[in-house]
Amino acid sequence: MRLLSVTLILSFVLLACDSEQGPSFNRNPKEVVSEFGIDVEAYDYENFKPFLNQKDDQIHVINFWATWCVPCVAELPYFEQLGAEYPEIEIVLVSLDFPKKIKENLIPFIQKNTLKSEVILLDEPDGNKWIPQIDPNWSGAIPATIIYKNDKSKFYEQSFNFAELEEAIALFDN
C-alpha cells in the first residue's frame, strides 16, 4: 500500500513538472471552462501578464486571435506547424472571443481544428486599458503576435505564413 502511495505521489509530481503543461509560472485563471475533454482557461489582464514576461531562455510566441477573425483563422495552421516542428518553442494562442461563447464557439473550434497549441481566453473588456500595455503602437487589430525570449521582444500586427514565422523566430534563436 505504501509503495502504491509513493508511486502515485511521484506520478503526480512528474506530471506537474512536465514542460508541455504550459508556462512555468503560477497560473491564476479567472475561470476554467471544460467541454468535450478540452479545458480553456480565461484570464483577466492582470493574471495574463505573466504569460508575457517569462525569463527562462525559451522562445515564447503569443498570438492574439478570435474564431470570427478570418485572417486569424487562416494563419493558425502555421502556428500549429511551428509548434510541431519546433517543440522547444512555447506557443500560446490567446483568444479574444466573447467569454460567454467559450462552450458554444471556442471549444468546438479547437476540437474541429484539432489545435495542439495551448489556447487561453483573455477576458478583459477594457481594451483601452490593456492593448497599449502589450504594445503602445498596437491599434487593437488582430491577428497580432508577440515573440520574445527573456528581455528581447518583438510585436507584430500582421498575419503570418510559415516562412515568415520561421524568419521571425530566427531573430531570437541565439
Image (cartoon, rainbow, N blue to C red):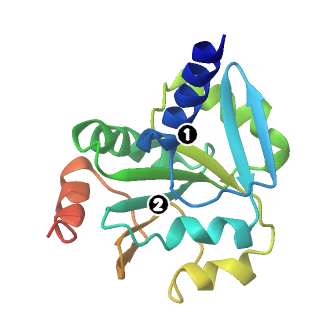
Q: From the viewer's side, name the closer residue of 53 and 62.
A: 53
Q: From mark 2 to mark 1, how far is it between C-alphas? A: 22 Å
Image coordinates of residue 30 in percent, x first then y, are 81, 55
Snapshot quadrant of residue 44: bottom right
Q: Which mark is residue 62?
A: 2
Q: Secondary structure at mark 2?
A: strand
Mark 2 or 1: in front is 1
Q: Which mark is residue 42?
A: none
Q: Secondary structure at mark 1?
A: helix
Q: From the viewer's side, name the closer residue of 28 and 108.
A: 28
Label 1, on which residue?
A: 16
Image coordinates of residue 58 in percent, x first then y, are 32, 62
Earlier in the chain: of badge 2 and badge 1, it is 1
- Residue extending furthest toward the bottom: 136
| Residue plotted at (49% across, 34% down) | 14
In the rendered view, tell whether residue 50 sits above or below residue 41. Answer: below
